[in-house]
Image (spheres, rainbow, N blue to C red):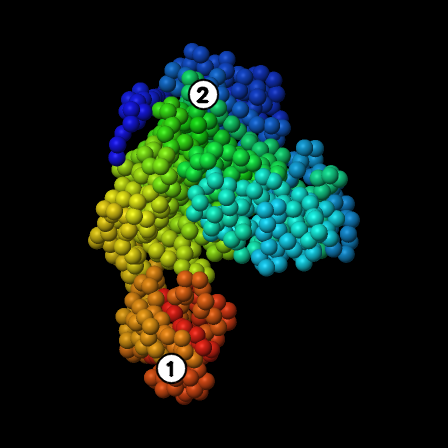
């Protein structure tokens, strides 16, 4: 890896920008703020407002001799706009300004407004109406702190709603054309790793004319993403996932619709006879709740935010004609035109509830980010030496934490450098924009992502790096990053219908970077196709060491380095319950990995238990009586033994024939609770199969004949097999058969008998 003069300048800057640490000298002053605070005293008896406390701090920092602490009383701080902190609000002389919760208190910076004055307008349907608060154009609504779904209707397949350059057909078939206000409707479409949410502009005949430029940026040929990405645009999608946001769509308890033009919100109560006036209904209004902003000449610095809850923010972009034309990981493409540049430099990050721009030595700790319409927290514009630790992120529409920027070769002052994201708990992010991730980092150096617990996510868990091997990104600021000791469970959830990601995902050449000590369990587990990875070294991911990770229950590969231009990666000393193909990257190696495990050894259990923010529960592997036992099949295209070898990336296969079967002799009678089957076909074509269990060898080749044999119990599985599907059994038996009733090829990636 060659180093440019700019990188040399960055190395020199690193020596001068090392964080100044005080030994936490005695506190210079403690100020107090409260939701109903006022005045300038800022004492415990006479607390200030947030603005008043900020003004007081500014008058104290010039000769700062110790930390200045602003203690926030518990309660709701309703924000009319963004609360900002800048260089003038920074700590001085090696000391900090600390904004913290009072002992035992929960201060909430709330960007929402209460909806009141509910009246029942449709008694039969239990629909109520209330005036929208001023300035509210909500995409979210919360009742007593719980999110409620916008009114939605089923989507349509491509044949019903064909895509064109101006929109898509199906206005009549979908009923959208008959709505009183079709221009309020928004659709969601997905293709591979991308999610699109564009609004309807109008109806012309049978065509839904879509908002521009959202629709233009969702189609192929933008020349602003790689030409290969033209296979991931809306015209390649299977259809519309769902339509959303019309009064006529309200049909399920809890659904709501905001009529912006008339100034009302409609809500169908959860329980018949309930009255929303008896609870608290809120809609978000403020986009960014807290912003810390500096410049390269005068960064914002030495500020700590501790124990504060950030809730009820909105995100304005998706409400506009820009919509959300997702590119990857929660970023999107904006504008009718833009530079012909394909390394992601001009992809736009989502708005976040809290944003730090050009910060130094900023800390967020023990805080909560929840009920947010955009992302949780962004550290950007060259923020350095900053820490995000012990926070909780949940119920967030886009991603959880964004660190760094999309410029591959930034100036030293604008390089995302030496930031840490540690001991956070992040779950249920990507609630609306399902192609987003829990933790994203762009072109970062010396980034540490350590001991976080991530769970229940629609796409990848951690994503570090950018660039896709584009020429301008092949030599970038990426280096010396650490992804260590994280617990990542239930990611790439199949219900989100996003593909081509992993528990840990990387891009770009990252010299001296490591991925170690992580526990990844259930990534794209129970998916419909061979997709989803544990650790995914995508595209130009290079110079990475992957060591001592525990990876189990993944939809496809436990580790993937598929591109020849992702070079010199080292994968060693890991544990997995499946097998991955050899790494394709030039100079990349896989050595001393324990794979196709039947149970996790003590050393692997210790690594997995130690991962995460604390309290990680490790899911041990279930006993498999079929592993390595004698397997046969009705005919052979690929050996029957490929279906019980512990490798879910290969598969057995019969030839195409009538009623094909695969069967295994367990060697002796076993108590069988479940049979676990992994679809062997890349696109999920194994459907409507039968599992048969017997104490004796099967003698009949036909399904009807095998079912009729003495002592045989059979179990029908309707629908498509997943990766995996489970069939409950509950009997003893020695012989297990999988059989189809029609003429087909039977392909199985794995059969496990528990």
Q: Name the residue rendered at 64%, 40% in the picture.
A: 138
Specify whether 493 is left or right of 276.
left
Q: Say whether disc 2 or disc 1 marks the residue closer to the N-terminus.
A: 2
The circle drawn on residue 26 is none
Specify whether 696 is left or right of 364.
left
Q: Residue furthest top?
A: 63
Q: Position of residue 497 (x, y in %)?
A: 50, 54
Q: Quadrant of the N terminus?
A: top left
Indicate the secondary structure of the residue bearing disc 2: loop
Structural crowding at the residue carrying mark 2, measured as other residues with C-alpha within 10 Å and reported as few (<14), some (14–19) or many (≥20): some
Residue 254 in sight in this render: no
Residue 667 vertical placement versus 282 (above, below)? below
Q: Name the residue rendered at 28%, 51% in the picture.
A: 584
Q: Quadrant of the C terminus?
A: bottom left
Q: Name the residue rendered at 41%, 49% in the picture.
A: 501
Residue 75 vertical placement versus 143 (above, below)? above
Structural crowding at the residue carrying mark 1, measured as other residues with C-alpha within 10 Å and reported as few (<14), some (14–19) or many (≥20): many
Residue 578 vertical placement versus 341 (above, below)? below
Q: Position of residue 393 (x, y in %)?
A: 48, 41
The circle drawn on residue 295 is 2
The tally of labels here is 2
Q: Position of residue 483 (x, y in %)?
A: 33, 41
Residue 367 vertical placement versus 658 (above, below)? above
Residue 198 in sight in this render: yes
Q: Position of residue 686 (x, y in %)?
A: 44, 69
Q: Name the residue rendered at 44%, 36% in the picture.
A: 341
Mark-to-mark CA distance, 2 and 1: 73 Å
Q: Looking at the rendering, which quadrant does residue 426 occupy?
A: top left
Which residue is denoted by mark 1 in the rendering?
694
């Amino acid at each position: 890896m060659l180093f440019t003069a700019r990188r040399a300048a960055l190395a020199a800057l690193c020596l001068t920008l090392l964080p100044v640490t005080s030994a936490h000298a005695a506190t210079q002053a403690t100020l107090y703020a409260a939701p109903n605070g006022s005045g300038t005293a800022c004492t415990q008896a006479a607390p200030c407002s947030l603005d008043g406390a900020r003004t007081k701090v500014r008058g104290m920092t010039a000769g700062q001799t110790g930390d200045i602490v602003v203690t926030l009383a518990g309660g709701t701080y309703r924000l009319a706009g963004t609360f900002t902190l800048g260089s003038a609000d920074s700590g001085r002389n090696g000391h900090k300004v600390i904004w913290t919760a009072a002992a035992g208190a929960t201060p909430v910076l709330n960007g929402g407004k209460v909806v009141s004055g509910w009246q029942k307008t449709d008694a039969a349907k239990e629909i109520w109406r209330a005036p929208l608060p001023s300035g509210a154009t909500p995409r979210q609504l919360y009742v007593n702190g719980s999110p409620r779904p916008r009114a939605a209707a089923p989507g349509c397949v491509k044949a019903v709603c064909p895509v064109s350059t101006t929109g898509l057909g199906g206005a009549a078939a979908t009923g959208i054309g008959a709505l009183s206000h079709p221009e309020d409707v928004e659709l969601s479409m997905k293709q591979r790793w991308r999610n699109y949410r564009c609004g309807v502009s109008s109806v012309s005949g049978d065509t839904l004319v879509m908002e521009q430029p959202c629709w233009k940026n969702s189609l192929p040929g933008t020349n602003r993403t790689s030409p290969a990405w033209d296979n991931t645009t809306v015209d390649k999608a299977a259809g519309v996932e769902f339509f959303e946001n019309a009064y006529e769509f309200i049909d399920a308890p809890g659904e709501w619709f905001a009529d912006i033009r008339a100034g009302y919100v409609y809500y169908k109560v959860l329980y018949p006879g309930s009255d929303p006036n008896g609870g608290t209904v809120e809609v978000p209004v403020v986009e960014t709740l807290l912003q810390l902003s500096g410049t390269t000449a005068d960064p914002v610095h030495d500020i700590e935010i501790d124990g504060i809850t950030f809730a009820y923010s909105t995100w304005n972009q998706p409400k506009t004609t820009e919509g959300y034309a997702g590119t990857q990981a929660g970023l999107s493409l904006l504008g009718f035109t833009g530079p012909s540049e394909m390394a992601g430099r001009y992809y736009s990050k989502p708005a976040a509830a809290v944003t730090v721009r050009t910060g130094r030595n900023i800390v967020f700790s023990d805080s909560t980010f929840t009920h947010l319409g955009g992302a949780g927290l962004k550290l950007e514009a060259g923020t350095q030496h900053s820490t995000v630790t012990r926070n909780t992120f949940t119920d967030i529409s886009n991603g959880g934490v964004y660190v760094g920027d999309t410029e591959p070769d930034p100036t030293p002052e604008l390089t995302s450098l030496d930031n840490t994201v540690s001991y956070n708990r992040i779950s249920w992010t990507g609630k609306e924009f399902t192609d987003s991730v829990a933790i994203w980092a762009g072109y970062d150096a010396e980034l540490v992502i350590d001991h976080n617990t991530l769970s229940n996510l629609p796409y990848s868990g951690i994503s570090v790096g950018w660039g896709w091997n584009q020429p301008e990104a092949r030599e970038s600021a990426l280096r010396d990053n650490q992804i260590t000791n994280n617990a990542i469970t239930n990611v790439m959830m199949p219900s989100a219908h996003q593909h081509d990601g992993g528990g840990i995902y990387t891009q770009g050449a990252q010299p001296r970077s490591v991925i170690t000590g992580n526990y990844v369990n259930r990534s794209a587990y129970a998916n419909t196709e061979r997709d989803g990875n544990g650790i995914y070294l995508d595209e130009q991911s290079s110079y990475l060491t992957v060591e001592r990770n525990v990876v189990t229950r993944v939809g496809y590969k436990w580790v993937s380095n598929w591109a020849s231009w992702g070079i010199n990666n080292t994968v060693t000393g890991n544990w997995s319950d499946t097998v991955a193909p050899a790494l394709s990257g030039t100079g990349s190696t896989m050595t001393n990995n324990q794979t196709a495990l039947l149970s996790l050894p003590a050393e692997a259990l210790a690594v997995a238990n130690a991962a995460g923010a604390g309290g990680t529960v490790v899911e041990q592997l279930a006993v498999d009586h079929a592993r390595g036992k004698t397997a046969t099949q009705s005919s052979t295209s690929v050996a029957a033994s490929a279906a019980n070898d512990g490798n879910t990336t290969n598969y057995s296969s019969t030839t195409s024939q009538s009623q094909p079967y695969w069967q295994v002799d367990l060697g002796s009678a076993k108590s069988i609770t479940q049979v676990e089957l992994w679809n062997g076909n890349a696109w999920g074509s194994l459907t409507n199969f039968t599992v048969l269990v017997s104490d004796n060898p099967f003698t009949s080749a036909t399904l009807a004949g095998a079912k009729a044999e003495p002592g045989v119990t059979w179990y029908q599985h309707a629908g498509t097999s997943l990766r995996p599907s489970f069939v409950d059994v509950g009997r003893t038996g020695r012989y297990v058969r999988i059989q189809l009733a029609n003429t087909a090829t039977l392909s199985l990636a794995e059969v496990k008998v528990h």
